[in-house]
Image (tube, rainbow, N blue to C red):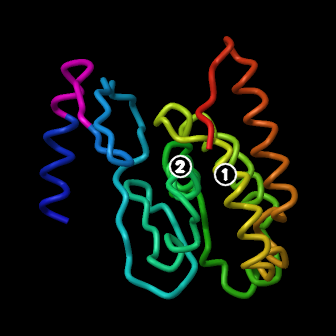
Amino acid sequence: YAREDRFFGMLSATLAKGPAPLLVLRAGQVLHLTIQGQAGCGGSVVLSTSSDLYAWPDGNRVMVTTAMMRQAANDNELAFVIAHEMAHNILGHANDRNDSMGLFGLLGFGSARVKRMEVAADSYAVPLMNAAGYSPFGGISFLQGASRRMWWSDLSLDHPSFGRRIKIVSAAIGRLSQANGLRLAQL
């Protein structure tokens, strides 16, 4: 991670001085953007070579497996996965989670607390995605596809069902579109 840490150190130092220009190549077009640092931005993203369908935060970074990345049909869907995990970092959930509850965790103890964190991360992912220029509707399409491909996840004791998560993301999109007349990025 040394090279990545140096890059993010330079980027953080630049953003500490104020807004910074950025050129982004997306879909063959060069976008001229200005970015401004925001405290608690959620850290960097690390791709992990794995056949496990998984993404997780560690408080500083977001890890996404190659299998999970391939589940995303487009950049907007992948942005939802990353924004959801970044939201956990920003909201301090990565430090608050206790996934190592052993047998008690398997029996569902503490699952209500974890479900509340998942709901909060889904809700906060929407404005994060929109601010980064991705369509929040990618969250809905990702969850719809995941519900078909990963149906067994609805049996989880510590995550809301896909149907509930779709409603949460839809409600967050509705709130965002009404707040100050913000325009949403479209798919």
Magenta span contains residue 17: yes
- The residue located at (43%, 66%) in the rendering is 63
- The residue located at (66%, 78%) in the rendering is 101
Q: Position of residue 90 (x, y in %)?
A: 50, 43
Numbered label attached to residue 69: none
Amino acid of disc 2:
Ala
Q: CA distance from mark 1 to mark 2?
A: 9 Å
Magenta span contains residue 21: yes
Whether residue 92 is situated above or below residue 96 in the rendered picture:
above
Q: Position of residue 138 (x, y in %)?
A: 64, 50
Q: Position of residue 186 (x, y in %)?
A: 62, 37
Give the side of residue 178 with respect to residue 26, left or right. right
Q: Residue furthest front?
A: 28
Mark 2 surroundings: few (<14), some (14-19) or many (≥20) residues within 10 A: many
- The residue located at (51%, 80%) in the rendering is 67
Q: Residue furthest top?
A: 180
Mark 1 surroundings: few (<14), some (14-19) or many (≥20) residues within 10 A: many
How many numbered marks have been drawn onto this rendered protein structure?
2
Q: Provide the secondary structure element on which disc 1 rests.
A: helix
Q: Which residue is mark 2?
A: 83
Whether residue 137 is situated above or below residue 185 in the rendered picture:
below
Whether residue 86 is situated above or below residue 129 in the rendered picture:
below
| Quarter of the picture holding the C terminus | top right
Q: Tell which of 93 and 127 is nearer to you.
A: 127
Amino acid of disc 1:
Gly
Numbered label attached to residue 139: 1
Which one is in front in this view, the residue at disc 1 or the one at disc 2? 1
| Quarter of the picture holding the N terminus | bottom left
* Magenta stretch in the rendered image: 13-23
Q: Provide the secondary structure element on which disc 2 rests.
A: helix
Given contact means CB atoms under 8 Å apart, are the residues at marks 1 and 2 in contact? yes
Give the side of residue 98 with respect to residue 110, left or right. left
